[in-house]
Image: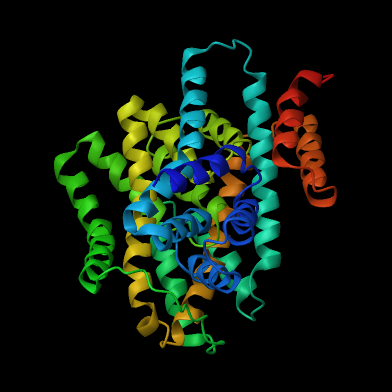
């Protein structure tokens, strides 16, 4: 357990660069260096983690720890990899709440960084997503639907509609990858985990509605956000924005400042939820938001992998996931339009800074931590 914890803690301290970089770190550490798993098993696990909703790098870390020494080791692996980022994001929230820095220009710089990062994520996801005749229609249709109908369940309804379109209209694709590894998790535990995943998805909104208590509201909002993320960590942005900003828990300024800061932190982007929870309700909010945004990942990993050999026989699963990923890209596009762009770009100079940061990321491949430094200082250099 100590070996697993400190191995993942080291990666949690140095793994800058987002989910793609995290996967490369895992490969170098656990396949090439420590040889805990083979390259073939690593690729198979990665393929299925990308198939599931949630943060792929965190789920892959849980898988590696579980294969190494059981489900407890999977939890220990997650703690080691995620803890540094949680503490850094909560620390950022403490600084922001204490108003230690009186000049808020740097906060506006963080918002411009967040705008460029989201635009780059949309471009990357568009390029990496599967080519399909319905792709452009689902992406644009999802974006327009979320912009026009801004209800609490709009995004969930859009995802379900697109899933239905994928099931009935998409042609069956190639078979999903075969995972030839054993997680040594009893089937009853697997069924319990999957049952809990869906039960909480419907039970938490009821507890929130009938109790009216803030802890239940935080748990419900962050659990649904963690359970409905398809297409990468950046897609959690519109889900969380819908839950915390539109309900008035925190302002757009604080939301985008935290998202900009999250780009420079090591570890999973989902720890943005830790910052949001702290801004909403202090340390208790940080604990609740962190636990419930990552809880779906644990339930899916422990519930899905032991049953995978049977589930993979349903060829329609791939078409449904393709359609859901297109809808997720559309939802992210709607979040970029509002509130990300409209709350960050106020002037011609802001537009210039945004375009410059976006260009540095796309064409020069400048890392996020350097983009953060440039973006934070840009408002201080405004000649107007």
Point 55% across, 67% down: residue: 42
In the rendered image, which quarter is residue 68 located in?
A: bottom left
Q: Considering the image in quadrants, where does the C terminus appear?
A: top right
Q: Is residue 152 visible?
A: no
Q: Residue at x 50, y 80 (%)?
A: 318
- Residue 94 appears at what percent x and percent y? 46, 20
Q: Where is residue 122 in the image (x, y as percent from the top left)?
A: 65, 56
- Horizontally, is 71 left or right of 252 in the view? left
Considering only vertical position in the picture, is 211 above or below 318? above
Eyeballing the image, is 88 above or below 246? above
Q: Is residue 279 above or below residue 371?
A: above
Q: Residue visible at 42% across and 83% down?
A: 312
Nearest to the observer: residue 300 or residue 132: 300
Tell me the residue at 66%/45% (across/down). 17
Image coloring type: rainbow
Residue furthest to the left in view is 210
Residue 150 located left or right of residue 380: left
Displayed quadrant of residue 141? bottom right
Residue 340 in view in this figure: yes
């Amino acid at each position: 357990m100590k070996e697993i914890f400190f191995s993942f803690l080291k990666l949690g301290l140095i793994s800058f660069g987002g989910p793609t970089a995290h996967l490369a770190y895992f490969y170098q550490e656990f396949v090439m260096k420590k040889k805990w798993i083979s390259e073939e098993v690593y690729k198979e696990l990665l393929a299925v983690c990308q198939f599931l909703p949630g943060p792929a790098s965190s789920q892959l870390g849980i898988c590696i720890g579980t294969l190494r020494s059981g489900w407890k080791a999977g939890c220990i692996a997650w703690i080691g990899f995620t803890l540094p980022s949680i503490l850094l994001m909560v620390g950022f929230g403490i600084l922001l709440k204490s108003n230690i820095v009186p000049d808020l220009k740097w906060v506006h710089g963080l918002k411009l960084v967040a705008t460029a990062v989201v635009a780059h994520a949309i471009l990357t996801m568009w390029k990496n997503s599967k080519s399909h005749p319905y792709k452009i229609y689902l992406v644009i249709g999802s974006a327009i639907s979320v912009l026009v109908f801004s209800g609490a369940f709009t995004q969930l309804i859009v995802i379900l509609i697109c899933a239905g379109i994928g099931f009935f209209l998409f042609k069956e694709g190639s078979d999903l990858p075969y995972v030839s590894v054993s997680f040594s998790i009893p089937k009853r535990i697997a069924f319990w985990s999957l049952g809990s995943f869906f039960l909480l998805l419907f039970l938490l909104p009821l507890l929130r509605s009938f109790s009216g208590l803030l802890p239940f509201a935080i748990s419900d909002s962050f659990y649904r956000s963690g359970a409905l993320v398809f297409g990468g960590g950046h897609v959690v942005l519109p889900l969380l924005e819908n839950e915390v900003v539109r309900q008035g828990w925190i302002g757009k300024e604080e939301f985008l400042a935290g998202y900009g800061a999250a780009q420079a932190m090591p570890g999973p982007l989902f720890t943005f939820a830790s910052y949001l929870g702290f801004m909403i309700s202090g340390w208790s909010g940080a604990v609740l938001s962190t636990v419930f945004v990552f809880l779906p990942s644990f339930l899916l990993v422990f519930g899905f992998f032991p049953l995978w050999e049977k589930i993979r026989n349903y060829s329609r699963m791939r078409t449904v996931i393709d359609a859901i990923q297109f809808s997720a890209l559309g939802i992210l596009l709607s979040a970029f339009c509002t509130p990300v762009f409209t709350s960050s770009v106020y002037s011609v100079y802001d537009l210039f800074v945004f375009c410059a940061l976006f260009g540095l990321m796309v064409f020069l491949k400048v890392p996020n931590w350097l983009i953060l430094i440039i973006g934070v200082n840009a408002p201080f250099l405004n000649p107007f």
